Amino acid sequence: MKSIISTKDLSKWYGDVIGLNSLNLNIYPGITGIVGPNGAGKSTFFKLVMGLIKPRLGEIDVLGEDPWKNSRINSRIGFCPDYDSLPLDSTGHDYLRLIASLHGVKDREPRVSEVTKTVEMSKDIGRKIGGYSKGMKQRIKIASALIPHPELLILDEPLAGTDPLVRKKLIELIESLHKDSSYDIIVSSHILREVERMTREIALLYKGRAIASGNVSKIRALINKHPHNIVIKGEGNKELAKRLLDESYVISVRLMDDGITVELNDPDGFFTSIPGILSDMNVSVDEMYSLDDSLDAVFEYLVEG
């Protein structure tokens, strides 16, 4: 199978700060997960893929082309950033029409209607974006990435800041974009298990290098040996803490002002059961994420091993 992205000794640095350090990586058609803590080089890698910055050393091939100063790449890649820059006073429909105009799409209205249906936002597309939930904003961002009929989608932390039920629906959407619409997709996350629910093909980045890539099963065996700390923020923290302490996969629960920190010895058990627990308790979760320090420790272990 021919790779859609290939790098050879790819390096990029900013002054004394290293973004990528001799990165050698091949990404093939399908869904590929890019996992790494803050500062791992994920954002630098995406910018190089899209031709937004120039490598200092090494080579990169994207969809058979060199992306640097290559305007053709712009229409072949759809990008969903990890930050929100949405016009809150605009409706979802008007925003997508604007994106279609910027991409030079001729049949704008049919294309807007098509991508809106794809991300299951037809019912709310006429509402102002400022009234959207976090999950709805993520769907609109993904819809905007689909506007130019891209071959490759890059989704940078699309699940960040969403509650478990919204994450489940977004994961289903991402899977359907590949299965039903045949998009090749690169999706990044701090949390390996989020990516694992979408694909078995991953690349672990750490300090600008790919320390492991390929099937996730062997890497999971190493990571599962380490405790994981998950932060959950929202309402009903005390009740949720008491409930989680009854679970065998929980080592400890610490209360914070705006949430709880849960230390786990079986992350699979936690991520499998937490949606049902939250639903049964009718607990509202605003945010759930893995602590970077814990993930850094895991990556340091893999590097040393």
Image (spheres, rainbow, N blue to C red):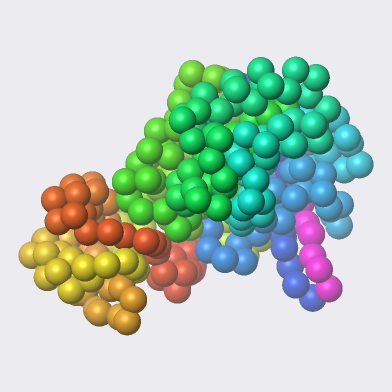
Magenta: main secondary structure equals strand
- Was residue 203 drawn as part of the magenta stretch in this picture? no
Say which quarter of the image contains residue 184. Answer: top right
Residue 283: x %, y % from top left? 22, 59
Q: Answer left or right for 252 relative to 152.
A: left
Question: Which range of residues does the magenta coloring cover?
Answer: 10-15
Q: Answer left or right for 240 relative to 40.
A: left
| Residue placed most toward the observer, 194 or 63 | 194
Which quadrant does the N terminus fall into? Answer: top right
Residue 88: x %, y % from top left? 62, 53
Residue 96: x %, y % from top left? 67, 35
Q: Answer left or right for 76 relative to 224.
A: right
**Residue at point 30% right, 80% down?**
256
Say which quarter of the image contains residue 61. Answer: top right
Which quadrant does the C terminus fall into? Answer: bottom left
Extreme residue toward the right, this view: 69
Q: Answer left or right for 35 relative to 65.
A: left
| Residue placed most toward the observer, 84 or 253 | 84
